[in-house]
Image (tube, grey):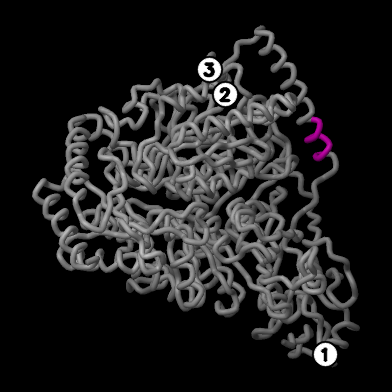
Amino acid sequence: MKTEEAIIYSYGFATIASAIPAYSKRGDIVFVDKAACFAIQKGLQASRSDIKLFNHNDMDDLERLLKEQEIEDQKNPRKARVTRRFIIVEGLYMNTGTVCPLPELVKLKYKYKARIFLEESLSFGVLGEHGRGVTEHFGINIDDIDLISANMENSLASIGGFCCGRSFVIDHQRLSGQGYCFSASLPPLLAAAAIEALNIMEENPGIFAVLKEKCKRIHKALQGIPGLKVVGESISPALHLQLEETTGCRERDVKLLQEIVNQCMDRGIALTQARYLEKEEKYLPPPSIRVVVTVEQTEEELEKAASTISEVAQTVLL
Amino acid sequence: MRPDPGGCFCCRRPVRANSCVANGEVRNGYVRSSAAAAAAAAGQIHHVTQNGGLYKRPFNEGFEETPMLVAVLTYVGYGVLTLFGYLRDFLRHWRIEKCHHATEREEQKDFVSLYQDFENFYTRNLYMRIRDNWNRPICSVPGARVDIMERQSHDYNWSFKYTGNVIKDVINMGSYNYLGFARNTGPCQEAAARVLEEYGVGVCSTRQEIGNLDKHEGLEKLVASFLGVEAAMAYGMGFATNSMNIPALVSKGCLILSDELNHASLVLGARLSGATIRVFKHNNMQSLEKLLKDAIVYGQPRTRRPWKKILILVEGIYSMEGSIVRLPEVIALKKKYKAYLYLDEAHSIGALGPTGRGVVDYFGLDPEDVDIMMGTFTKSFGASGGYIGGKKALIDYLRTHSHSAVYATSLSPPVVEQIVTSMKCIMGQDGTTLGKECIQQLAENVRYFRRRLKSMGFIIYGNEDSPVVPLMLYMPAKIGAFGREMLKRNIGVVVVGFPATPIIESRARFCLSAAHTREMLDTALKEIDEVGDLLHLKYSRHRSVPLLDRPFDETTYEETED
C-alpha cells in the first residue's frame, strides 16, 4: 500500500471495531455515513464518542454538519481545542455498492480540520490500477488519509484484517488496540496465504482490469430484469438486487427474494440474500440479493447467471 | 442443598488437615476446631457459602502480601523514572535531544492533536526503555522449544535491526501451549494439510450467508459432546466471541455482575450490551452474594422494578493471577438467587480436570448447571477461535442473533480440522491414550514447578493446580532485567507490567505445557534460581495469607493449629 507502517489483526470484524476506540474517546466527534457497516457501528459504540450521521455520499449534508460544528466551536474555544474530529467513510460501501467521493472529502478535511479514517474492505484489491484501493482510483496522495483499514477476507481470501498508515498513527494501536493486545495472533498458515495473495497481486496487475470488465458486464446484463433493480456502481464487484416495488412488508419481501435464491440454486447459480441484524442496525437497508463477481468466472458463466436470474425473477414476481 | 458436615466420619475425632483420608470425604485446607466439628456433626444446615460440603478436593490458593520495603522501593523507582521522563520530554521539546519518535505531518500541525500528551508519556518514557522484551518475532512452531530472531537496537529501542542470527531452541515458558498441540508434525498437521488441499484457506462469507460449511457443523457437534452440553456454536476469534455475544444475550434493563479482574473482552462485551454493570471483588463470594441480595431486594436503580436478567460473568482461570474461580460456590449462589452464569474457560478448557473438560470437570460438577459455557480454541487446542455451549434453545437463538454469525466470516477450514483432530485426541476417540497422557503430564508439571519455585523463595500467586504461574517482580527495572537475563540463558519468558497489571505488581508469567519434559523444567528452574539470586527476587517470607478479605467467624474455618 506504500505506507509507512501496517498492523495485522486476526479477525476482520475486530479490525475496524478496535481501531476506532483506540483514537476516538468520549467527548470526540465523529462524522459517519448513514450506510456504514455494522463493524463501524460497533466500533463507534465502544468508543462512546458523539456520533453525527450524514446522508449517504451526500457531501453537502456533511458540510452542513461540519459548519454547525464550527459555530459550536467558536462559542467554546477552549473545549474545541481538545475535541478531536474524525470522518469515517468506506471506500466501497458494502450495503449499497457505491464509491465514496474521496477528493471532496479531502478538501473538507483540510478546510474543517478533521481526520479521515477510510475503511477499504471491499475496495482493497479491486479499485485502482494496482488494486491499492480507492486512493489509487482517485489519484490521491495516501498520506492525506490518516488511517486505512481493510479486512483480508474479501480480496485476499484469507482471514484477518490490517490497518495501514503513517507510523505516527499506527504505532499507537500496538498498545491500545483491544483486538491486538488482548487477543491471539493470526495463525501462520493464514498469514502465509495472505502474503502469497499479495505477491500474486503485485506480479499480475492485469487482473484488476479483467475484474473491472467483468463487473461492468454483469452490471449491464442485470439491468433489464423486470421487477428487480440493480443497486451499485458498475465498478463494484458486489451489487445488490432489490425489488423494484416493495410489497410494503419486509417479511414478504424477504420471502420473495428467498424464493428467487432457492430457484436459482436449483438451476446451478449460488446466490445469497444480504443478511442484517434487523433490530440492531441503525439504518436498516432494504432486503436484497447480493451478487458477487470473481475474476475466475468466464464470460459464458456470467451470461448464464444473468439469464437464469432474469428467468427466475420473471416466474416468481409476475 | 445440604452440604455434608465437615467432620471426619471414619475416625470420629477432630479433623487435622491433610492427614485423614476417607473416600470422597470433604476436606479443605483448614482444620475445624472441635466445637465446630461437633456442632457440624450434630447435623445443622450450614450457610451456603461455607467451604464445607461443596469442594471435593483441597482448594489451595494464596496471594502473598507485598513486603512493605519492596512496595516503597517500587514507588520510588517509578518516581525516578517519571522525573527522568519529564526531563527527557523537556530536552526533546527544546531540541537538545534528538527526537526519534514519529510526529504529526507538517500539513496537519494545526489539527487538534491526535493523542493527549500524558497518554503517551508512559509509552515514550517507560515502555520504550524495555520494549525489547515484547513483540519478539519467533520463526518456528511455538512448542516446548522455539527459535527467536535476534534483534539489536542502536538507538535505545526506538528502532530494531535484525542481525540475521536466530537464537535456537529457547525453552518456551510463554506460549499457551498447555497440552502441547502446537506442533508441526503429527496427525493434526496431516489432517489440516489434507483439508487445506480440499477446501482452501478462506471462506469469504458469513455463517448466515454462504459460509456455513459442513465442517463447521461437525465441529459444533463435537464441541457439544466434549463439554457435555446440548449444543455449541463456534466463532472465528475468542475476543470477538465475548464482545459480540454478550450484547446479544443481555440488554438494557439487565444486570451484569462481573469479577474485578475479568478480561478486556468480557468488559467490552458487557459495555456494548448496555446493561448495568456491577463489579465484585476478585473470587470473593461474600461480595458476590451481597451484590445479588441488593439486586433482588432493590431492583433497578430508579424505577425499582425487578431486573430482567442477572448475569454473573466469571472466568475459569484468570490469566494474570493464576487463580481458579470458586465454581461450586458460584453455582450454589446462582441457584439460590436464580441468576444466570457465563463461564469463560479460555485458559482452563483442556488444561484442568482429570479428563481435560475444564473447570467444571475439575470440581466434578454438572455442566448443565452452567448456563453459558464459553471458551477458546487458541490455548489448549493449538488453533484459533472461540465457542459457546449451552442448551439448544440458547444456541439456536445465538445462531440468528449473534453479531458474529451475521457479519463476520466463519472459521477457516484447516483451523477447524486442527481443532477437530486435537479434540478427538483429548477425548481419546482417535484410539490412542495420547490425550490422557498429556493431561496427566501437565498436572504433574504444574505441581512440580510450583512446589520448586515456592521452595526457592519466590512469591507466586494463584492456585496450586493452575498451569499459569505468575512470579512477582514488582520493580520496573527488574521487569526488563528479568526478561533479558532469561533470554541470555536461552529461556523465553513473558513479563507483564502496567497497564495489564496494577502499577506496582508487575510480574513474569510462566505458562506450563505438557510438552515440557522434566529435564527442561529442571534447566529452567536452575536458571530462574540464578537470576533470582542475581536480581534479589526472592521476596517470599513463607507467610501465605488465606485468599480473601472476608471476615473470619467461627462457623467458617480457622487456621491450622499445629
- Comparing B110 with A32, the one in front is A32
> In terms of secondary structure, where does tag 1 sit?
helix
Q: Nearer the viewer, residue B479 or B419?
A: B419
Q: What residue would you read off at disc 3?
A: B105
Mark 2: secondary structure:
helix
- Circle 2 is placed at which residue position? A112
Q: Residue at x 36, y 36 (%)?
A: A99
List the single residue furthest toward the bottom.
B42
Residue A304, how many percent across, how many down?
A: 11, 55
Marks 1 and 3 share the same chain:
yes
**Marks 3/2: CA–CA distance:** 16 Å
Q: Position of residue A73 (x, y in %)?
A: 69, 27
Instruction: Check contact, mark 3 vs mark 2: CB within 8 A.
Output: no
**Residue B435 on image: x %, y %:** 42, 68
- Judge depth for marks 1 and 3 and give the one in front: 3
Residue B73: say if magenta. Answer: yes
| Residue under numbered circle 1 | B41
Look at the picture and state if B25 lies above or below B307.
Answer: below
Percent coordinates x, y for residue B461 in the rendering: 70, 54
The residue range painted magenta reads B70-76
Quick one: label 1, few (<14), some, or many (20+) residues within 10 Å? some
| Amino acid type at mark 1 | Ala
Chain letter, disc 3 residue: B
Residues flagged by tags 3 and 2 on a common chain: no
Q: Residues within 10 Å of mark 2 (few under 14, many from 20)?
A: some
The numbered mark, 1 or 3, whose residue comes first in the sequence reads 1
Q: Chain of mark 2?
A: A
